[in-house]
Image (spheres, coloured by chain):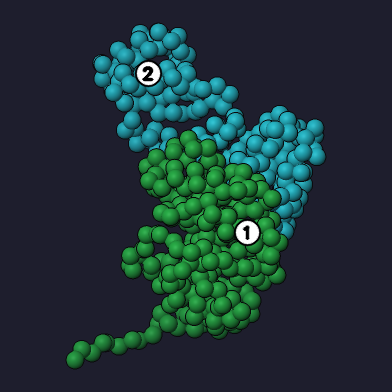
Chain colours: A cyan, B green
């Protein structure tokens, strides 16, 4: 796999690590705008090729190498640049284009502009906090990138919630597993779900929104 | 040459429709960009509806004017980029055209707008004295902190944007140091809300910081001396103020 990561900050750091883990023999090119950061990137990621380009040269580089690039990750510290580069890469025919956001408020803008794979690193913080604090009855545990859905955690607090969760699973035929109050993970039938369990359900986003509405969440 | 107009904005629902429509009416304008600072009103929705490109500025927690301007420059695709405050009550297409006219005529690569009215308080009391001390060649600018600027897009990519209120004077100094041709144009009268005095402290600080940082960088102040001097200020025994 041949990947290009644009940016040399901490968002790009995690992207480069992930690309290397995915394909240790693949080729990774990291594009940065300052020579100091390029030198640092060379030391931090000896397996990657760090390239110094100006802001305006990136698009030409992508166009010129469009048949060679399998994945482009735009992870600069400017969402404006990330949007610009992601849109250009999509237009150039790069098969997988990913943008990593600096500001989560930009997610709908990127999606509207046709950037399909947008990573919002802050989503994890929100869902983890909610999961740990447990104040909310439905938490997003994982969102799928390729379909509008994910894995959602539902805390069964009372008999009313239990009834609604059971009927939801049966109606949507959703795969699920359960974390018991005593921290055991179990697979079981719908009938075996109990008050105190946390039910992890995989379903479409619109379905879980409907459930949330019915539960008053 | 195509022109991109950038409006940094935050909670400016009241102004955004008129600003975007006016900008699109100016000659050569191919795109209007609204860089939002995380508005809680409908600024973003209205801007999108009016056909503007919209981006929320990258810095989530500490949004600043400089970050907004940087993002606007980065998102733009015109040969010329014009930055205009969104809340100018008497904004007209001619106002925008006047700003980029010297660039179109090949007389300048970067233009600062100035106005009929007297310059602001931070300009007169902070920016101008410091510029006179360290960059006397720039002290001739009537309004060095003016937020209305235009420039060839490529010149904005040559310099770093300060994140906050120091951005305007920072750009002026840095572009001057790079030998960019700079002009100042009189834009006439600007009808604009004035900031209350107590809101100017942060602005004054950031402007002073931007100028002093560059003075150190350009060898106009000895950095070691400055550090030592500033650190002693905090330890000074100021005594007690006597009242008559």
Residue A38 at least partly seen: yes
Name the side, left or right, on which B12 lies relative to B173: left
Q: Residue at x 60, y 32 (%)?
A: A115
| Residue tagged 1 | B101
Establish if A182 lies above or below A37. above
- In the picture, the quarter occupied by the N terminus of chain A is top right
Numbered circle sitting on residue A210: 2
Q: Secondary structure at mark 2?
A: helix
Q: Residues within 10 Å of mark 2 (few under 14, many from 20)?
A: few
Q: Chain of mark 2?
A: A
- In the picture, the quarter occupied by the C terminus of chain A is top left
Residue A125 at least partly seen: no
Numbered circle sitting on residue B153: none
Count of labels in the image: 2
Task: Give the number of the mark in front: 1 or 2.
Answer: 1
Q: Nearer the viewer, residue A29 or B70?
A: B70
Residue A136 is situated, as x and y percent measured from the top left of the image, at 33, 30
Residue A197 is situated, as x and y percent measured from the top left of the image, at 35, 21
Q: Chain of mark 1?
A: B
Establish if B105 lies above or below A3. below
Q: Nearer the viewer, residue B18 or A133?
A: B18
User: Are dots 1 and 2 in contact, CB under 8 Å?
Assistant: no
């Amino acid at each position: 796999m041949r990947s290009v990561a644009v940016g040399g900050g901490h968002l790009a750091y995690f992207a480069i690590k992930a690309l290397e883990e995915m394909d240790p023999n693949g080729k990774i090119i990291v594009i940065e705008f300052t020579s100091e950061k390029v030198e640092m990137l060379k030391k931090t990621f000896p397996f990657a090729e760090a390239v110094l380009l100006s802001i305006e040269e990136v698009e030409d580089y992508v166009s010129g190498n469009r048949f060679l690039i399998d994945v482009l990750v735009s992870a600069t510290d400017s969402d404006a640049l990330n949007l610009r580069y992601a849109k250009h890469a999509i237009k150039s025919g790069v098969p997988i284009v990913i943008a990593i956001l600096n500001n989560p408020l930009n997610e709908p803008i990127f999606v509207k502009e046709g950037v399909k794979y947008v990573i919002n690193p802050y989503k994890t913080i929100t869902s983890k906090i909610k999961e740990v604090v447990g104040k909310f009855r439905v938490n997003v545990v994982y969102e799928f990138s390729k379909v509008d859905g994910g894995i959602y955690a539902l805390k069964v607090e009372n008999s009313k919630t239990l009834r609604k969760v059971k009927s939801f699973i049966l109606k949507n035929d959703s795969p699920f597993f359960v974390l018991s109050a005593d921290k055991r993970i179990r697979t079981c039938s719908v009938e075996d779900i109990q008050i105190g369990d946390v039910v992890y359900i995989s379903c479409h986003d619109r379905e879980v929104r409907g459930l949330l509405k019915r539960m008053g969440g | 040459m195509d022109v991109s107009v950038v409006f940094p904005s935050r909670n400016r629902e009241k102004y955004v429709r008129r600003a975007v429509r006016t900008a699109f009416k100016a000659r050569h304008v191919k795109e209007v960009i609204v860089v939002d600072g995380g508005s809680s009103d409908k600024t973003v929705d209205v801007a999108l509806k009016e056909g503007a490109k919209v981006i929320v500025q990258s810095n989530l927690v500490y949004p600043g004017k400089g970050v907004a301007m940087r993002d606007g420059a980065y998102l733009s695709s015109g040969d010329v980029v014009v930055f205009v405050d969104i809340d100018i009550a008497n904004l007209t297409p001619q106002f925008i055209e006047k700003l980029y006219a010297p660039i179109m005529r090949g007389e300048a690569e970067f233009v600062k707008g100035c106005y009929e009215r007297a310059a602001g308080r931070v300009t007169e009391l902070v920016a101008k004295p410091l510029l006179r001390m360290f960059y006397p060649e720039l002290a001739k600018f009537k309004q060095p902190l003016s937020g209305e600027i235009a420039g060839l897009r490529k010149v904005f990519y040559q310099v770093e944007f300060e994140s906050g209120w120091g951005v305007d004077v920072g750009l002026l100094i840095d572009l001057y140091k790079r030998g960019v041709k700079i002009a100042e144009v009189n834009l006439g009268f600007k009808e604009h809300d004035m900031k209350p005095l107590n809101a100017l402290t942060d602005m004054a600080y950031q402007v002073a910081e931007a100028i002093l940082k560059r003075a150190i960088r350009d060898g106009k102040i000895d950095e070691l001396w400055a550090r030592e001097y500033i650190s002693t200020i905090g330890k000074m025994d100021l005594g007690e103020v006597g009242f008559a």
